[in-house]
Amino acid sequence: MGEMLLGHLKEDLQLIILRPTIILSTYKEPFPGWIEGMRTTDTFIVGYGKGKQKVAMGGRDTIIDVIPADMVVNSVIAAMVAHRNPSSRTTVYHISSSRRNQIKIDDFIQNGVDYFKKNPWIDERGKPVKVKQFHLLDSMDSLHKYIAIHYMPSLKILKWANFMLCRHLQVQHTNLQRRINHAIRLAELYKPYVFFKGIFDDTNAEMLRMATRESNADDTFNFDPTTIQWDKYLKETHIPGLVKYIF
C-alpha cells in the first residue's frame, strides 16, 4: 500500500523501490557477522542454541529467501548511482537470493544444528549447553500431533490435579495452556512464510549488477547472491555473529 501511495503522489519524480527479502548479518562490511537485532529466521537459531527450542515448522522443500545486510546497503548505493539522471520512471528491485542461489529451510536450520553440536553455547554459569535432537514439523497437522503427544497429557494431568487440590495448581495449568496457545498462534502467524513456494524475480537487480560490473565497482559494492557459499557463511559468519552480538 505504501508503494501504491508513492506511485500516486510522485508526479514527475523518479521512484526507485528496493525490496529486500529476509535480512541476515553482514557478509563482509563493515566486518563479517555484524547484526544488531534478531530477525525472523534467527529466532529458531537463538532458541535452539540456548537449549530452549528443538522444534521448528516448515516445508522441507521451502526456499528461505535471505540476503546479508551489507548486500542490501550496496544495492541501495548502486541504485542511487544508476538512477542519478532525472527521470519519471518507476523501477522495482528485488534484492533476494531465491532465484540465483537457493537455500532450503531444512538446510538452513541444519546448519544451525550442526554448528551448536560442534560449538555449544556457554551459558551464564559457564557451562556448555547441550542441544537436543531437532524436529522439523512439515505441516500444521504434524504440529498438532506433536502437541497432542508431548504436551496435552501433561495439561490433562495438571487439570485433574488442580481440581483435586482445590485449584492450588491453577498457575501451573494456566502457564502450560498459555504456552501451547502461544505456540499455535506463532505457527499460524508464520505459516504463510515457512511454506512459501514463490521465487522472486530479480531480473532488474541483475541488470543493476551488470551496470556495477561495467563500472568495475562490483567488488566494492557487491550484492550478488551467487558469491555466497551458504554453509560457509552460516557456520563461519552469521551464526558466530548471532552468538557474539545477540546471545
Image (spheres, rainbow, N blue to C red):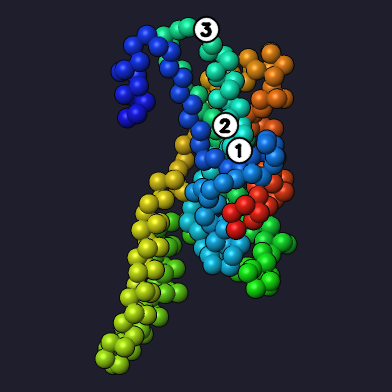
Asked if labels 1 and 2 touch by Cβ distance under 8 angstroms, the answer is yes
- Is any atom of residue 135 visible in this view? no
Residue found at x 58% / y 22%? 77
- Residue 157 quadrant: bottom left
Q: CA distance from mark 3 to mark 2?
A: 22 Å
Residue 12 drawn at (x, y percent): 37, 8
- Is residue 87 left or right of 125 when viewed as pictured? left
Residue at screen point 69% across, 41% down = 32
Left or right placement of residue 86 versus residue 233 in this view? left
The residue that label 3 is drawn on is 85
Please, what secondary structure does the residue beneath circle 2 have? helix
User: Is residue 235 at all visible to an observer of this figure?
Assistant: yes
Q: Is residue 192 above or below residue 216?
A: below
Residue indicated by mark 1? 68
Badge 3 element:
loop
* Image spot of residue 34 (x, y percent): 64, 44
Q: Residue at left 39%, top 57%?
A: 186
Q: Which residue has dot 2 on it?
A: 72
Camera-side residue: 230 or 178? 178
10 Å neighbourhood of mark 1: few (<14), some, or many (≥20)? many
Q: CA distance from mark 3 to mark 1?
A: 28 Å
